[in-house]
């Protein structure tokens, strides 16, 4: 029987002036440049930035898991 896999989980915060979806997509795109084998992303919190009574930005806090590889 082969051993199971091990995954590491990190927290990311993505931002966007357009939407929460764009904020989450941006965070994953950035993380995928330096992390291998991204597996699952869980949105843990959504919030907005507001200036002068208007929404100016969206933030998505995300827990992302990726496969742990031993050297």
Image (spheres, grey):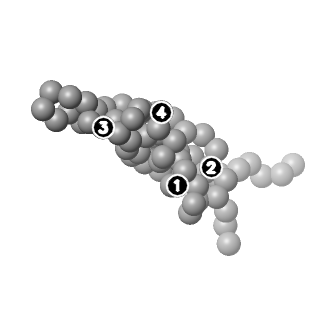
- The quadrant of the rendering that contains the C terminus is bottom right
Would you name the residue on which mark 3 appears?
A: 57
Per the image, label 1 sits on a secondary structure element best described as helix
The numbered mark, 4 or 1, whose residue comes first in the sequence reads 4
Please tell me whether mark 3 or mark 1 is closer to you in this view.
Answer: 3
Where residue 20 sits in the image (x, y, percent)? 42, 32
The numbered mark, 2 or 1, whose residue comes first in the sequence reads 1
Would you name the residue on which mark 4 appears?
A: 21
Q: Are marks 4 and 3 in contact (CB under 8 Å)?
A: no
Where residue 58 sits in the image (x, y, percent)? 34, 36
The foreground one among 2 and 48 is 48
Q: Please say if 20 is above or below 26.
A: above
Would you name the residue on which mark 2 appears?
A: 38
Mark 1 is surrounded, within 10 Å at the Cα level, by few (under 14), some (14 to 19) or many (20 or more) other residues, namely some
The numbered mark, 4 or 3, whose residue comes first in the sequence reads 4
- How far apart are the two marked residues, 4 and 1, measured between alpha carbons? 16 Å
Would you name the residue on which mark 1 appears?
A: 31
Please tell me whether mark 4 or mark 1 is closer to you in this view.
Answer: 4
Q: Is residue 42 visible?
A: yes
Residue drawn at x 67%, y 62% is 69
Q: Please say if 37 is above or below 15.
A: below
Q: Give the label on residue 49, or none.
A: none
Where residue 68 sits in the image (x, y, percent)? 63, 57
Residue positioned most to the bottom: 71
Q: Are marks 2 and 1 in contact (CB under 8 Å)?
A: yes
């Amino acid at each position: 029987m082969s051993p199971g896999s091990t995954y590491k989980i990190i927290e990311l915060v993505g931002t966007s002036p357009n939407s929460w979806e764009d904020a989450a997509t941006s965070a994953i795109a950035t993380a995928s440049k330096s992390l291998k084998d991204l597996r699952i992303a869980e949105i843990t919190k959504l919030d907005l930035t507001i200036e002068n009574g208007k929404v100016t930005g969206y933030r998505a806090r995300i827990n992302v898991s990726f496969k742990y590889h031993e050297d």
